[in-house]
Amino acid sequence: MAAARLAPTPLPSSLLSALESLHDIQDHVRAHKYPQARRALNRLTQDLSEPDAALSEVRRHVSVHTLDAALTSLEAAETARHVEPEALTAALQPALDLPLTRAEALNSVGVLHAIHEETGQARQLFEQAAEADAGHYRAVSNIGNLELQAGNFKEAEAAQRRAIALNPDFAGAHHNLGVALRRQGRVNDSVKAIRRGQRLSVRRMREDAPRLSVGSAANKGLNAKWLTPANLRIIGLVVAALVFYFFLKGR
C-alpha cells in the first residue's frame, strides 16, 4: 500500500481502497478490535465487488469468504469463553489457517495457557504469533509479561519496548514497561511509563465513546451521554489509583 501511494503513476482508486481496507482489517485484528475489523471487511467486500480489472490481483490472493470465516471464529471464540486451550484451538482453526489472522489466534490460545499457568506453552504460542506477524505488538508484550513473571526484568523491559516501537499508542505495553522498570528500582522512569499508559487508556476511552452511542440492536438504549469530559477525568483518576495500588504491590 505504501509503495502504491508513492508510485509515480497513480494507481486506480479502487485498488488503493481495497488495499486500505485490507490493511485496516489487519490493524484492527492486531488491536483486538473485532467490530472495527468486521466493518473493514465489509468495506473490502464492497471494494472487490467493483468490476475493475485492477482488482484482479487482489482477488487472486484474498478470499473474502475465507477472511469472513476466520474473523467469525475469532468473534465466536470471544463470546464463547472457552476454558480449555484445546477447545479454543479447535474453535479458532479458520483463523489459524489464514496468515492474516493466524497470529491473533495463536496469541489468544497463548493467553489461555498463561491463565492456566502453563508458561512454557504460552511462551511458545506468543513467539509463534510474533513470528507469524512481526507487527503483532500484543503478542510481543505478552512475551514481556512472561519474562516479568519469571523475574527477568531487563528482558521484560526489552520486550515491552519492542511492543511500543511497533505501536507507540498501546497503553498496555507502557503500563507493563512501568512495572518492569519499577522492579529494577528505576522509579522515576517507571512513573513516567505508567502515566503515559494511563493517558493513552483515557484517550482510547474517548475515541471509543462515539461508537457506544450507536450500539447494536441488542443495546439500542445505550448511549455515550455519561461519557462527559468530567466523567472521563474521574475514570482516569480511578485508573491511576488502581495502577498506583498495583505499583505498590510490586515493591
Image (cartoon, rainbow, N blue to C red):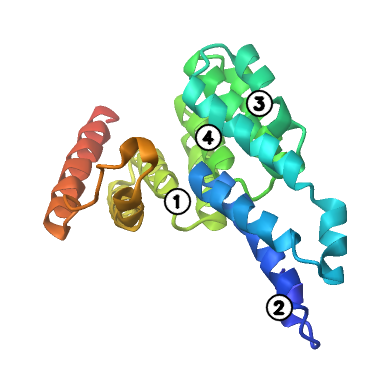
What is the C-alpha distance between the residues marked 3 and 2? 34 Å
What is the C-alpha distance between the residues marked 4 and 2? 33 Å
Judging by the rendered image, the residue that carries numbered circle 1 is: 170
Nearer to us of marks 4 and 3 is: 3
Label 1 vs 2, first from the N-terminus: 2
Nearer to us of marks 1 and 2 is: 2
What is the C-alpha distance between the residues marked 1 and 3? 25 Å
Nearer to us of marks 4 and 2 is: 2
Quadrant of the image containing the C terminus: top left
Residue 89 or residue 42, whichever sits in front? 42
Badge 3, how many Cα within 10 Å: few under 14, some, many 20+? Answer: many
Instruction: Determine the image quadrant of residue 55.
Output: bottom right
SS for callout 3: loop
Label 1 vs 3, first from the N-terminus: 3
Judging by the rendered image, the residue that carries numbered circle 4 is: 142
Judging by the rendered image, the residue that carries numbered circle 2 is: 5
Q: State the image coordinates of residue 40 (x, y, percent, origin top left).
A: 59, 54
Badge 4, how many Cα within 10 Å: few under 14, some, many 20+? Answer: many
Instruction: Determine the image quadrant of residue 249.
Output: top left
Judging by the rendered image, the residue that carries numbered circle 3 is: 92
Three-letter amino acid code at the position of disc 2: Arg
Badge 2, how many Cα within 10 Å: few under 14, some, many 20+? Answer: few
SS for callout 2: helix
162, above or below 127, in the image: below
Nearer to us of marks 1 and 3 is: 3
Quadrant of the image containing the N terminus: bottom right
What is the C-alpha distance between the residues marked 1 and 2? 26 Å
Residue 139 or residue 109, whichever sits in front? 109
SS for callout 1: loop
Label 3 vs 2, first from the N-terminus: 2
Horizontal relation, residue 18 to residue 39: left or right: right
